Image (cartoon, grey):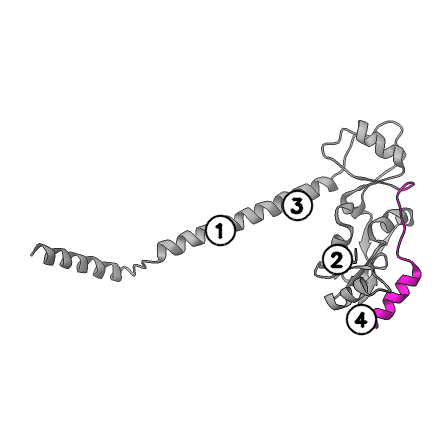
Amino acid sequence: ESIQKCTSTIDQINSELRRLNFDPNLEERLINDQRNLYQIITEKRDQINSLDRELGFLEFRPHRPQGITEIYGPLVRLFKVKDEFNNEYNLALQKTAGGKLFNIVVANENDASLLIKHGHLNKRYGFIPLTKIDGRTISKDAINKAGRIANGRDANFALDVIQFDPRFDQAMKFAFGQSFLCNNKDTAKDLAFNPSTMIRSITTDGSVYDPN
């Protein structure tokens, strides 16, 4: 009789749970949802921290020591994508220049030294002194060979995708002068690994193909 009573009670409870649309897997799903939300929050927080670091580099406002010739600011502020490319190469350009985008362009080595020593900098900055930087680029012969290998496919010398004040020519060559930008991986691979070119190539989705 006691067992029957317990069984009856259990049946009543199950009936009530069914009436309430009780789902025995609900708790597990909620825990999984919570775990996924925590993961998303962590990823978003990392993205915010990364953006905060980048924006911090963009807001370069040092104390200006006596003897400074010229401070031009972060490289990324000194060029823009040509209108005909409609920003399709933005990601590829970011991958091409990497951290150089946030280097501070100055007139000469002395300016960089003065800023490091007396600029009261709140972050560790890299500098691009225009009189010292190595602005070597891909040769015209290599560019022509790349054009023949691309054979009509979309491939552009990175420097040809941007526009900038001629004063910053050396800085732009330093950041963008060794790469081609392509709209697909096959073209990028051909330019990067063909023995006659061996040019670092980056796709519009940010994939990098480096022969070195």
Q: For mark 2, give the secondary structure.
A: helix
Rounded to the nearest angstrom, the CA distance separating label 2 from label 3 is: 18 Å
Q: Quick check: is 156 in the magenta stretch?
A: no
Q: Which residue is mark 3?
A: 51
| Front tag of 4 and 3 | 4
Q: Quick check: is 140 in the magenta stretch?
A: yes
Closer to the chain start, of discs 2 and 1, is 1
> Does the residue at mark 4 contact the one at mark 3 (Cβ under 8 Å)?
no
> From the viewer's perspective, is 56 left or right of 200?
left
* Residue depicted at 73% across the width and 65% down the height: 185
Circle 3 Cα neighbour tier, 10 Å, few/some/many (<14 / 14–19 / ≥20): few
Q: Which residue is mark 2?
A: 92
Q: Which mark is residue 111?
A: none
* Residue depicted at 9% across the width and 54% down the height: 2
Q: Quadrant of residue 66?
A: top right
Q: For mark 4, give the secondary structure.
A: loop
Q: Quadrant of residue 120?
A: top right
Rounded to the nearest angstrom, the CA distance separating label 3 from label 1 is: 21 Å
Q: Quadrant of the C terminus?
A: bottom right
Q: Which stretch did the figure color magenta?
A: 130-153
Question: Looking at the picture, does residue 19 appear above or below residue 40?
Answer: below
Rounded to the nearest angstrom, the CA distance separating label 4 from label 3 is: 34 Å
- Tell me where residue 79 appears, x and y as whole percent: 82, 51
Q: Which mark is residue 153?
A: 4
Amino acid tagged 1: Leu
